[in-house]
Amino acid sequence: MKIFLLLGLFLLTLNADKNMDNILELYKSEKYKKACVNGAKLFHRGYKNEAFLSIIGDACAKTDYIYALSQLQNSLIKTESGRMNASYFATLVLQKKLVYQFFLDNLELGHLVLPQTGHILSILFEHIIKKDFTTLTHSPKKIGFSEGTKNIVAYIISDKKIKKVVVEVYKDKKLVNTHTYW
């Protein structure tokens, strides 16, 4: 009986390593969405390697799967780099929640100070707290601002029962990226 348990554990470990290699290949080939989704599945099956979880988290951040970051950050506690990544993920989660409240509840954010990152949520958050934006419409709330050579428009939409914050990035008046958060 012990031999079967050990064999099963060994096969499970081999399978986890194979899955990890596949996810790393997805990440390296910039297939971040697939790396995030597949990595989250592996995480939920108990895989807790901090370097690997940090890669999954980065893939999720790059594809706006911010909800996954709230789960990953709690497992990043053993190493200095893991804790730094956990702080980055926590910052994005909090900024997402606060931006959502800004749009839906008219929450005043000007008194808050959070770490800055290069992520679009952080850029939007910084413009909101500095009141460095133009209100394009009040109901529904829609704002716009410039960031370098890009123009950014953020607004709220209703999709069935869920309200979402949409961030559109324009360059030379051409839409180059759309981010959606709920």
Image (spheres, grey):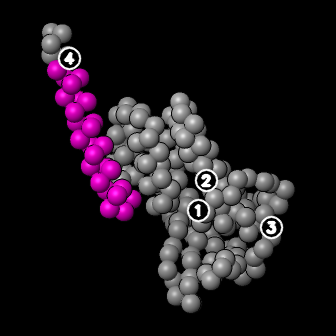
Q: Choose between 6 and 143: the one closer to the eye.
A: 6
The answer to whether residue 170 is magenta is no
Q: The disc labelled 2 sits on which kind of residue?
A: Leu
> Which secondary structure lies at badge 4?
helix
Q: Nearer the viewer, mark 2 or mark 1?
A: 1
Question: Which residue sits at x=66%, y=66%?
Answer: 123
- Residue behind mark 1: 119
Mark 4 or mark 2, which has the lower sequence index?
4
Image quarter hosting the C terminus: bottom right
Q: Amino acid at mark 1?
A: His
Q: Pick whichever, 38 or 104, lies toward us.
A: 38
Amino acid under disc 4: Leu
Q: Residue furthest right?
A: 111
Q: Which disc, if any, is residue 92?
A: 2
Cβ–Cβ under 8 Å for marks 2 and 1: yes
> What residue range appears in magenta?
7-33
Judged from the image, the secondary structure of the residue bearing numbered disc 1 is loop
Q: Which residue is mark 3?
A: 130
Query: Callout 4: few (<14), some (14-19), or many (20+) C-alpha neighbours within 10 Å?
Result: few
Q: Which residue is mark 4?
A: 6
Against 180, is 95 above or below? above
| Distance from the alpha carbon under mark 2 to that under mark 1 | 8 Å
